[in-house]
Image (cartoon, grey):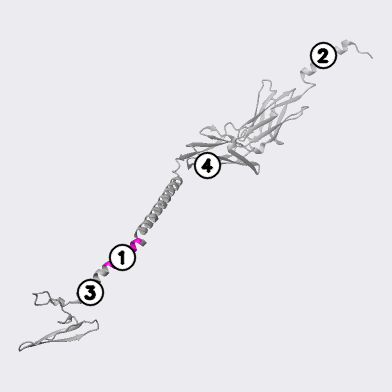
Protein backbone atom coordinates (compact mmCIF):
# COMPACT_ATOMS: atom_id res chain seq x y z
CA UNK A 1 0.00 0.00 0.00
CA UNK A 2 1.42 3.28 -1.00
CA UNK A 3 0.81 6.58 0.71
CA UNK A 4 0.79 9.72 -1.34
CA UNK A 5 2.58 12.83 -0.35
CA UNK A 6 -0.74 14.48 0.34
CA UNK A 7 -1.44 11.91 3.01
CA UNK A 8 1.94 12.65 4.69
CA UNK A 9 1.19 16.36 4.60
CA UNK A 10 -2.17 15.83 6.25
CA UNK A 11 -0.61 13.64 8.96
CA UNK A 12 2.04 16.27 9.71
CA UNK A 13 -0.59 18.96 10.00
CA UNK A 14 -2.56 16.86 12.48
CA UNK A 15 0.56 16.33 14.61
CA UNK A 16 1.22 20.03 14.73
CA UNK A 17 -2.33 20.71 15.84
CA UNK A 18 -2.10 18.07 18.55
CA UNK A 19 1.15 19.55 19.81
CA UNK A 20 -0.42 22.98 19.91
CA UNK A 21 -3.32 21.73 22.00
CA UNK A 22 -1.01 19.84 24.40
CA UNK A 23 -2.39 16.45 23.78
CA UNK A 24 0.91 14.97 22.78
CA UNK A 25 3.21 16.78 25.33
CA UNK A 26 2.18 17.41 29.00
CA UNK A 27 4.82 18.50 31.49
CA UNK A 28 5.53 20.66 34.57
CA UNK A 29 8.40 23.11 34.44
CA UNK A 30 9.79 23.93 37.92
CA UNK A 31 12.26 26.68 38.75
CA UNK A 32 14.61 27.15 40.36
CA UNK A 33 15.74 23.56 40.52
CA UNK A 34 18.30 24.50 43.24
CA UNK A 35 17.73 27.16 45.84
CA UNK A 36 19.99 28.19 48.73
CA UNK A 37 18.53 30.47 51.36
CA UNK A 38 19.28 31.65 54.85
CA UNK A 39 17.37 30.13 57.71
CA UNK A 40 14.41 32.33 58.68
CA UNK A 41 13.92 33.76 55.23
CA UNK A 42 11.25 33.00 52.59
CA UNK A 43 11.87 30.75 49.60
CA UNK A 44 9.74 30.63 46.41
CA UNK A 45 9.30 28.10 43.59
CA UNK A 46 7.37 28.61 40.32
CA UNK A 47 5.63 25.72 38.55
CA UNK A 48 4.43 26.19 34.95
CA UNK A 49 2.07 23.51 33.58
CA UNK A 50 2.11 22.73 29.85
CA UNK A 51 -1.26 21.20 29.13
CA UNK A 52 -4.59 20.97 30.82
CA UNK A 53 -4.51 20.25 34.52
CA UNK A 54 -6.95 20.16 37.42
CA UNK A 55 -5.15 19.59 40.77
CA UNK A 56 -1.56 20.41 41.82
CA UNK A 57 0.16 19.27 45.07
CA UNK A 58 3.39 20.37 46.78
CA UNK A 59 5.48 18.23 49.09
CA UNK A 60 8.52 19.17 51.22
CA UNK A 61 10.73 16.23 52.15
CA UNK A 62 7.87 13.93 51.09
CA UNK A 63 5.36 15.66 53.38
CA UNK A 64 2.29 17.06 51.62
CA UNK A 65 2.09 20.72 52.59
CA UNK A 66 -0.21 22.40 50.00
CA UNK A 67 -2.91 21.61 47.39
CA UNK A 68 -3.99 23.89 44.51
CA UNK A 69 -7.12 23.56 42.37
CA UNK A 70 -7.23 25.10 38.93
CA UNK A 71 -10.43 26.86 39.97
CA UNK A 72 -8.41 28.89 42.52
CA UNK A 73 -8.95 26.82 45.66
CA UNK A 74 -5.62 26.70 47.67
CA UNK A 75 -5.34 24.53 50.79
CA UNK A 76 -2.09 24.77 52.87
CA UNK A 77 -1.23 22.47 55.76
CA UNK A 78 -0.02 25.41 57.88
CA UNK A 79 0.52 29.14 57.72
CA UNK A 80 4.16 28.56 56.85
CA UNK A 81 3.13 27.56 53.29
CA UNK A 82 1.22 29.58 50.69
CA UNK A 83 0.57 29.70 46.92
CA UNK A 84 -0.81 32.02 44.24
CA UNK A 85 -1.38 32.06 40.48
CA UNK A 86 1.32 33.91 38.60
CA UNK A 87 -0.37 33.91 35.16
CA UNK A 88 -3.75 34.92 33.87
CA UNK A 89 -4.56 31.45 32.47
CA UNK A 90 -3.65 29.77 35.80
CA UNK A 91 -0.91 27.79 34.12
CA UNK A 92 1.71 29.19 36.55
CA UNK A 93 1.63 28.67 40.32
CA UNK A 94 4.03 30.31 42.81
CA UNK A 95 4.69 28.22 45.94
CA UNK A 96 6.23 29.94 49.02
CA UNK A 97 7.77 28.58 52.24
CA UNK A 98 7.84 31.26 54.92
CA UNK A 99 10.45 31.39 57.67
CA UNK A 100 12.26 28.36 56.34
CA UNK A 101 14.14 26.15 58.80
CA UNK A 102 17.18 23.93 58.58
CA UNK A 103 14.98 20.87 58.96
CA UNK A 104 13.24 21.70 55.67
CA UNK A 105 16.43 21.38 53.66
CA UNK A 106 16.03 18.77 50.94
CA UNK A 107 13.60 18.03 48.14
CA UNK A 108 10.63 20.19 47.13
CA UNK A 109 8.31 18.37 44.66
CA UNK A 110 5.45 19.64 42.48
CA UNK A 111 2.97 17.02 41.26
CA UNK A 112 0.09 17.61 38.81
CA UNK A 113 -2.57 14.93 38.62
CA UNK A 114 -2.94 13.26 35.29
CA UNK A 115 -0.27 12.23 32.86
CA UNK A 116 2.22 14.80 34.20
CA UNK A 117 5.50 13.67 35.66
CA UNK A 118 6.43 15.05 39.12
CA UNK A 119 9.18 17.67 39.12
CA UNK A 120 11.61 18.05 42.06
CA UNK A 121 13.85 20.93 43.16
CA UNK A 122 16.54 20.96 45.91
CA UNK A 123 16.39 23.35 48.82
CA UNK A 124 19.52 24.25 50.84
CA UNK A 125 19.13 26.20 54.06
CA UNK A 126 22.13 27.93 55.65
CA UNK A 127 22.34 29.08 59.25
CA UNK A 128 23.92 32.19 60.72
CA UNK A 129 25.21 31.73 64.26
CA UNK A 130 26.98 33.91 66.80
CA UNK A 131 30.38 35.66 66.60
CA UNK A 132 32.42 37.26 69.38
CA UNK A 133 35.98 38.34 70.20
CA UNK A 134 37.20 36.78 73.42
CA UNK A 135 38.43 39.14 76.14
CA UNK A 136 36.85 42.38 74.99
CA UNK A 137 38.75 45.69 74.92
CA UNK A 138 42.48 45.70 75.59
CA UNK A 139 45.12 48.16 76.79
CA UNK A 140 48.73 47.39 75.89
CA UNK A 141 52.11 49.10 75.65
CA UNK A 142 53.34 50.42 72.34
CA UNK A 143 55.15 47.89 70.11
CA UNK A 144 53.75 45.03 72.18
CA UNK A 145 52.67 41.88 70.34
CA UNK A 146 48.91 41.41 70.76
CA UNK A 147 46.60 38.50 70.03
CA UNK A 148 42.85 38.46 69.42
CA UNK A 149 40.69 35.35 69.31
CA UNK A 150 37.39 35.32 67.42
CA UNK A 151 34.91 32.49 68.11
CA UNK A 152 31.87 31.59 65.99
CA UNK A 153 29.24 29.07 67.09
CA UNK A 154 26.23 27.33 65.48
CA UNK A 155 26.93 28.13 61.84
CA UNK A 156 26.03 26.08 58.78
CA UNK A 157 28.07 25.67 56.73
CA UNK A 158 31.38 26.72 58.31
CA UNK A 159 31.57 30.51 57.98
CA UNK A 160 34.19 32.51 56.17
CA UNK A 161 36.03 34.66 58.75
CA UNK A 162 37.95 37.86 58.07
CA UNK A 163 39.40 40.74 60.14
CA UNK A 164 39.59 44.50 59.80
CA UNK A 165 41.60 47.15 61.64
CA UNK A 166 40.04 50.61 61.64
CA UNK A 167 37.88 49.44 58.75
CA UNK A 168 40.78 48.24 56.60
CA UNK A 169 41.03 44.57 55.69
CA UNK A 170 43.76 42.62 57.44
CA UNK A 171 46.14 40.48 55.40
CA UNK A 172 45.18 36.82 55.73
CA UNK A 173 48.78 35.94 56.63
CA UNK A 174 48.28 37.63 60.02
CA UNK A 175 45.55 35.24 61.17
CA UNK A 176 44.58 31.57 60.92
CA UNK A 177 41.15 29.93 61.19
CA UNK A 178 40.07 26.43 62.19
CA UNK A 179 36.58 24.89 62.13
CA UNK A 180 35.04 21.80 63.70
CA UNK A 181 31.61 20.20 63.60
CA UNK A 182 29.22 20.38 66.51
CA UNK A 183 26.24 18.18 65.70
CA UNK A 184 24.74 19.49 62.47
CA UNK A 185 26.51 22.87 62.68
CA UNK A 186 30.04 24.27 62.76
CA UNK A 187 32.11 26.14 65.34
CA UNK A 188 35.15 28.12 64.22
CA UNK A 189 38.09 29.87 65.88
CA UNK A 190 40.24 32.55 64.27
CA UNK A 191 43.39 34.02 65.89
CA UNK A 192 44.84 37.37 64.83
CA UNK A 193 48.30 38.57 65.86
CA UNK A 194 50.04 41.87 65.15
CA UNK A 195 52.25 44.51 66.77
CA UNK A 196 50.42 47.32 68.54
CA UNK A 197 51.37 50.74 67.17
CA UNK A 198 48.39 53.03 67.82
CA UNK A 199 44.80 52.93 69.03
CA UNK A 200 42.85 50.53 66.81
CA UNK A 201 39.32 49.22 66.42
CA UNK A 202 39.61 45.49 65.69
CA UNK A 203 36.64 43.75 64.02
CA UNK A 204 36.02 40.06 63.33
CA UNK A 205 33.54 39.30 60.52
CA UNK A 206 31.84 35.97 59.79
CA UNK A 207 29.56 35.23 56.83
CA UNK A 208 27.95 32.55 54.67
CA UNK A 209 26.92 33.03 51.00
CA UNK A 210 23.26 33.70 51.79
CA UNK A 211 23.95 36.25 54.52
CA UNK A 212 23.32 39.78 53.17
CA UNK A 213 25.76 41.39 55.60
CA UNK A 214 28.47 39.63 57.64
CA UNK A 215 27.98 39.10 61.35
CA UNK A 216 30.67 41.04 63.24
CA UNK A 217 32.16 41.66 66.65
CA UNK A 218 34.44 44.62 67.48
CA UNK A 219 36.78 45.55 70.33
CA UNK A 220 38.93 48.60 70.97
CA UNK A 221 42.68 48.35 71.39
CA UNK A 222 44.21 51.19 73.40
CA UNK A 223 47.95 51.65 72.97
CA UNK A 224 49.88 53.55 75.64
CA UNK A 225 53.50 54.74 75.27
CA UNK A 226 55.85 52.09 76.50
CA UNK A 227 57.76 52.89 79.73
CA UNK A 228 61.38 53.97 79.31
CA UNK A 229 63.86 51.17 79.18
CA UNK A 230 66.14 51.76 82.16
CA UNK A 231 68.26 48.71 81.40
CA UNK A 232 70.68 50.54 79.14
CA UNK A 233 70.90 53.53 81.47
CA UNK A 234 71.52 51.31 84.49
CA UNK A 235 74.18 49.39 82.58
CA UNK A 236 75.92 52.64 81.61
CA UNK A 237 75.75 54.03 85.16
CA UNK A 238 77.05 50.78 86.63
CA UNK A 239 79.88 50.67 84.09
CA UNK A 240 80.97 54.27 84.74
CA UNK A 241 80.55 53.80 88.49
CA UNK A 242 82.68 50.66 88.46
CA UNK A 243 85.34 52.38 86.37
CA UNK A 244 85.37 55.40 88.71
CA UNK A 245 85.56 53.16 91.79
CA UNK A 246 88.42 51.20 90.26
CA UNK A 247 90.26 54.42 89.41
CA UNK A 248 89.81 55.72 92.97
CA UNK A 249 91.05 52.42 94.36
CA UNK A 250 94.16 52.54 92.18
CA UNK A 251 94.83 56.17 93.14
CA UNK A 252 94.41 55.29 96.84
CA UNK A 253 96.83 52.38 96.56
CA UNK A 254 99.40 54.58 94.80
CA UNK A 255 98.98 57.34 97.40
CA UNK A 256 99.38 54.92 100.32
CA UNK A 257 102.42 53.37 98.69
CA UNK A 258 104.10 56.74 98.21
CA UNK A 259 103.22 57.81 101.74
CA UNK A 260 104.66 54.64 103.20
CA UNK A 261 107.77 54.94 101.05
CA UNK A 262 108.34 58.51 102.22
CA UNK A 263 107.98 57.51 105.87
CA UNK A 264 110.35 54.56 105.56
CA UNK A 265 113.94 55.70 106.45
CA UNK A 266 116.79 54.87 104.13
CA UNK A 267 120.27 53.77 105.05
CA UNK A 268 121.91 57.16 104.69
CA UNK A 269 119.32 58.83 106.91
CA UNK A 270 119.82 56.12 109.55
CA UNK A 271 123.59 56.56 109.52
CA UNK A 272 123.25 60.33 109.72
CA UNK A 273 120.90 60.07 112.67
CA UNK A 274 123.17 57.57 114.45
CA UNK A 275 126.17 59.87 114.04
CA UNK A 276 124.17 62.83 115.31
CA UNK A 277 122.98 60.91 118.37
CA UNK A 278 126.50 59.65 119.04
CA UNK A 279 127.88 63.17 118.96
CA UNK A 280 125.15 64.45 121.26
CA UNK A 281 125.76 61.54 123.64
CA UNK A 282 129.51 62.32 123.73
CA UNK A 283 128.89 65.94 124.53
CA UNK A 284 126.50 65.07 127.33
CA UNK A 285 128.90 62.49 128.72
CA UNK A 286 131.77 64.97 128.74
CA UNK A 287 129.59 67.53 130.47
CA UNK A 288 128.61 65.07 133.14
CA UNK A 289 132.21 63.97 133.57
CA UNK A 290 133.47 67.50 134.06
CA UNK A 291 130.82 68.15 136.68
CA UNK A 292 131.84 65.03 138.60
CA UNK A 293 135.55 65.92 138.69
CA UNK A 294 135.05 68.69 141.28
CA UNK A 295 131.48 69.11 142.06
CA UNK A 296 132.29 71.01 145.29
CA UNK A 297 134.29 73.69 143.60
CA UNK A 298 133.22 77.12 144.77
CA UNK A 299 134.43 80.15 142.95
CA UNK A 300 136.52 82.60 144.83
CA UNK A 301 134.48 85.02 146.89
CA UNK A 302 131.48 82.66 147.15
CA UNK A 303 130.92 81.50 150.73
CA UNK A 304 127.91 79.28 150.42
CA UNK A 305 126.75 76.50 148.13
CA UNK A 306 123.37 76.24 146.54
CA UNK A 307 121.24 73.41 147.83
CA UNK A 308 120.96 71.96 144.36
CA UNK A 309 124.69 71.34 144.43
CA UNK A 310 124.49 69.26 147.59
CA UNK A 311 123.80 65.59 147.68
CA UNK A 312 122.28 63.25 150.22
CA UNK A 313 121.33 65.84 152.87
CA UNK A 314 124.40 68.09 152.93
CA UNK A 315 126.99 65.79 151.48
CA UNK A 316 128.92 66.73 148.43
CA UNK A 317 131.75 65.12 146.61
CA UNK A 318 135.36 66.02 147.19
CA UNK A 319 138.57 64.84 145.69
CA UNK A 320 140.55 62.06 147.29
CA UNK A 321 142.88 64.52 149.17
CA UNK A 322 141.67 65.09 152.73
CA UNK A 323 142.99 67.89 154.95
CA UNK A 324 142.37 68.20 158.65
CA UNK A 325 143.05 71.59 160.25
CA UNK A 326 142.80 72.65 163.84
CA UNK A 327 142.91 76.35 164.64
CA UNK A 328 142.53 78.38 167.79
CA UNK A 329 140.16 77.31 170.42
CA UNK A 330 137.95 75.68 168.01
CA UNK A 331 138.68 72.86 165.86
CA UNK A 332 137.44 71.75 162.55
CA UNK A 333 137.51 68.22 161.51
CA UNK A 334 136.59 66.51 158.40
CA UNK A 335 135.25 62.97 158.39
CA UNK A 336 135.74 61.19 155.19
CA UNK A 337 133.98 58.18 153.86
CA UNK A 338 134.64 56.64 150.55
CA UNK A 339 132.42 54.98 147.96
CA UNK A 340 133.11 52.68 145.13
CA UNK A 341 133.48 55.45 142.55
CA UNK A 342 136.65 56.85 144.06
CA UNK A 343 134.97 59.83 145.54
CA UNK A 344 134.56 60.30 149.23
CA UNK A 345 131.79 61.88 151.07
CA UNK A 346 133.07 64.71 153.28
CA UNK A 347 131.26 66.34 156.21
CA UNK A 348 132.44 69.43 158.00
CA UNK A 349 132.02 69.68 161.74
CA UNK A 350 132.97 72.86 163.61
CA UNK A 351 133.74 72.62 167.30
CA UNK A 352 133.78 75.81 169.46
The answer to whether 287 is drawn above or below residue 170 in the figure is: below
Is disc 3 in contact with disc 1, using a CB cutoff of under 8 Å?
Answer: no
Q: Is residue 227 left or right of residue 289?
A: right
Q: Which residue is mark 3?
A: 289
> In which quadrant of the rendered image does the N terminus lie?
top right
Q: Which residue is mark 4?
A: 146
Which of the pair 168/106 is nearer the observer? Answer: 168
Q: Which residue is mark 2?
A: 13
Magenta segment's dominant SS is helix
Whichever of callouts 2 and 1 sits on the residue coming sooner in the sequence is 2
Whichever of callouts 4 and 2 sits on the residue coming sooner in the sequence is 2
Q: Give the Cα distance between marks 4 and 3.
A: 107 Å
Q: Is residue 231 left or right of residue 352?
A: right
Q: Which residue is mark 1?
A: 275
Q: Give the Cα distance between marks 2 and 1.
A: 169 Å
Q: Is residue 35 left or right of residue 294?
A: right
Amino acid sequence: MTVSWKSWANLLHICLLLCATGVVSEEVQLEPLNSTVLEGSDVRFNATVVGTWQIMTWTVQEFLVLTVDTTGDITPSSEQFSARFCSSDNSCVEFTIHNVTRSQSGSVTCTVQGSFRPTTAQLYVQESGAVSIVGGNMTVNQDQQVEFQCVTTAWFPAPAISWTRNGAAVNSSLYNTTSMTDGDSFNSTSILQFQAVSNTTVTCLATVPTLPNPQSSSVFLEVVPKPPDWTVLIAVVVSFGSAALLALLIIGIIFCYKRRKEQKPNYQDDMRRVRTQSQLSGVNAASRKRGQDNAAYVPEGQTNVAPSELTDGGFFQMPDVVNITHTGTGSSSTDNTGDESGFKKHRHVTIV
